[in-house]
Amino acid sequence: MPHEPVKQAAPSVEASAPERDSAGASDRDAENAGKIREALLKTFFTGLSWTAAARGLTSIGTAARYIVFVRLLKPFDFGVIASATLICSGLLAATDPVMGQALIQQEDEIAPYLDTLLTTSFVRSLIIGVILIVFSRPLGAFFHLGDAYTVFWAMVPLPILRGIQSPRLISLYRRLDFHFLTILNVSEVAAGFVFGLMAVLYWRDWRGLVFSILVGAAVRDILTYWLFPHWPRLSFSMARAKTMLSFGLWFSFGTLCDFISKQLDNLVVGHLLGPGALGNYQMAFRAGEMPVAEFTTSAFVVTFPMVARLRGDRHARAHLFWSVIAVVAAVGVAYGAFIFAFGAQTVLRLFGPAWVHAVNPLKVLCIYGLLQGFLVVGRSFLSGLGHPERYVVAAAVRAGVLAIAIYPLTALHGPTGAAAAGVLSILVALPIMGYLLQQTE
């Protein structure tokens, strides 16, 4: 009997070996998963640093351009150009199938799709150009522009320039080579500033601003073909278009709802209060949302393809999500505190007394910019996970709330009321976005 305890102990020792092997394998798997997450997050922050640099330099250049141009022009001139860009951007958003976005998350080779993508964009831009020419007078009357309705004729080349850039530019997002964005953005802003300044000094009205925009877009087009060579051919494949549209239509509808949410206030301000008030409001809008918008735009460019790679790693996605949200909150709160404390002095010193009416809307739009940043982060995650249709729910609710609130608030409180309507629409949409993210695996 003395040997029985030994016989009983032996099986327990033998059983512990596979347990240790299993535990060791689990540790190794956890370690490997951790290394993969670390590498992916490193890639994310590297890409973010490049896109942030591109957007940051663009913002500095844009701000410098506005500071110079507002000293030379009147709010009326900025209201005229804001009216034209609003309609032009609206037509682009309403007709954009967002076919290129489908290629970002597609695993197949994209070269066979590029000619179809380019042809669709080119034909769409020609249609938009015809619409701008035909409806220039009614649009001018809607915005109370008088003889300046010809701004819609002057803007006809813009959608064409946007539509003929190299379709191979989409490979930039697939390869996460975001340093090229710095080259494109800085070159566009620099060209627009230099040639736009000469045009503003020559014409002394809104025509100089139009010239600035067109030159910048033309320079960007040239650079896209230099950096991403592609021999353009007008060729169309219905089968390939359907493949891209299956993803892009939902993304497109979400983009359209976003555009309505961001631009309906400009439309109402311009119609109710005229181009001078619209010029002031546009300046406040750009300044109010700029810091957070620049960061979230950069983050969206990177997180969209990154989240597509992290579909199977919920923990890494959650870590990435809260990291981005924390930065958005920090930037938004810090900038908002600065504007509430020193906004009036900053506007008067940088832009002059003609822009004093932008101060009150600017304070409200700082809050708008912060909340908008949270929505953009949520959209990038839903799109990266292959569910752009879920974002449409939040975007449609936001657009609906704004449509209800914008007219009475603007009529009662002017540009500040329009800004408040924008904040209200996002406050309603944010809980819906949170729920959609929770339900998405």
Image (tube, grey):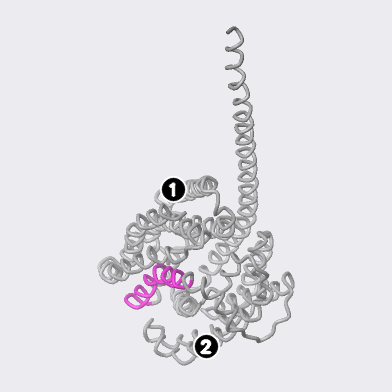
- Asked if residue 344 shows in the view, the reply is no
The percent position of residue 251, horizontal first and vertical second, equals: 48, 69
Give, as a three-letter code, the residue at label 1.
Val
31 to 152, vertically: above or below: above
Residue 306 inside the magenta-drawn segment: no
User: Under tag 1, what secondary structure?
Assistant: helix
What's drawn in magenta, residue-wise?
Answer: 252-274
Name which of mark 2 and mark 1 comes first in the sequence. 2
User: Under tag 2, what secondary structure?
Assistant: helix
Question: Residue at (66%, 61%) from the top-left corner?
Answer: 182
Q: Distance from label 2 to label 1 (Cα)?
A: 42 Å
79 to 417, vertically: above or below: below
Residue 371: image quadrant is bottom left
* Marks 2, 1: nearer the viewer: 2
Q: Which residue is mark 2?
A: 127
Residue 389: image quadrant is bottom left
- Asked if residue 365 shows in the view, the reply is yes
The percent position of residue 98, horizontal first and vertical second, equals: 53, 73
The percent position of residue 305, horizontal first and vertical second, equals: 59, 59
Give, as a three-letter code, the residue at label 2.
Ile
Name the main secondary structure of what is drawn in magenta.
helix
Residue 260 inside the magenta-drawn segment: yes
Label 1 near label 2: C-beta < 8 Å? Answer: no
Tell me: 208 left or right of 341. right
Question: Residue at (34%, 57%) from the top-left corner?
Answer: 427
13 to 378, vertically: above or below: above
Question: In the depicted view, which residue is nearer to us: 185 or 357?
Answer: 185
Q: Which residue is mark 1?
A: 333
